[in-house]
Image (cartoon, grey):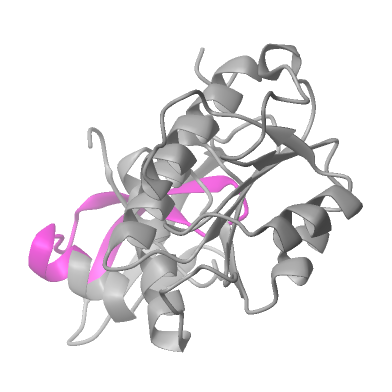
Amino acid sequence: MSGRKRFFVDKIDGAYAVLEGDEFVHAKTVQRVDTGSEITLLDGSGKEYGAIVSRVDKHSLLCHIVSVGDGEREPKQDMYLLFGALKGDRSELVVQKATELGVNKIGVFSSEFCSAYINENKLERLKKVAREASKQCMRSKTPEISYFSDFKSALQSASCYANKLFACEFIAESQTDLLRLSGSTAMVIGSEGGFSEREAKIASEENFSFISLGKRILRAETASIALVAQVALVLGEMR
């Protein structure tokens, strides 16, 4: 990561902001930020605040805001990735790469053939992964991350998107040409076990368009990353 070190804060209070919690620990012990250091603060609004560290306390940094501007690396197209919870640290990998590729929202869901689970601690870990990935790729916002224990609720959370893509390994051919996409796009990828016929029926009832990712069977994490990359390219986010 080049340029000033970047950190998320809960809020900007006038000309000052306080860096606390995990971000403080990262700034102090990993990035070696000290009094007089020039850093960039992010409050999740899309703004970027140039700041100088004016005081270092035991558990916080006091930062003086010296400039403010709009972030230039946020996606212009709205992309939403929904994927089945994965075993081990694979969900973290998907969240990290989807964040780098420019998704605005990420939803993790449970499904019939899903053998992983998400609890509050795991959800918080995914949010932390997204935050770190946002800083690494120089974004100004962190994608919103949600968990759905009910598959249909996960699909319904994408009701307002112009394109709703459902990647399914047992369809004969795609119903949508990915090369012709435009506008906001939601993408659904299954877990390691894929989808059941019942779940595919639910997706059809929710007006999702079925797509194929080719003749080879991809790992769930590969499928998520590959689909997001294709959609981002077509929507102009890779230029």
Q: Does the magenta-highlighted stretch encompass residue 34?
A: yes
Please indicate whether residue 232 sits to the left or right of residue 100 in the image: right
Please indicate whether residue 29 sits to the left or right of residue 139 in the image: left
**Residue at screen point 51% across, 23% down:** 214
Relative image position of residue 27 (x, y in whole percent): 20, 64
Work out whether residue 73 can be spotted.
Answer: no
Work out whether residue 77 can be spotted.
Answer: yes
Q: Within the image, what quadrant is residue 41 found in?
A: bottom left
Tally the marks.
0
What's drawn in magenta, residue-wise?
A: 27-55
Q: Nearer the viewer, residue 154 or 203?
A: 203
**Residue at screen point 83% across, 43% down:** 161
Q: Nearer the viewer, residue 145 or 13?
A: 145
Q: Within the image, what quadrant is residue 76 found in?
A: top right
Q: Work out which quarter of the rendered image holds the N terminus and state it.
A: top left
78 vs 130: above or below:
above
Please indicate whether residue 115 sits to the left or right of residue 150 in the image: left
Relative image position of residue 155 (x, y in whole percent): 76, 59
Please indicate whether residue 20 sits to the left or right of residue 108 in the image: left
190 vs 126: above or below:
above
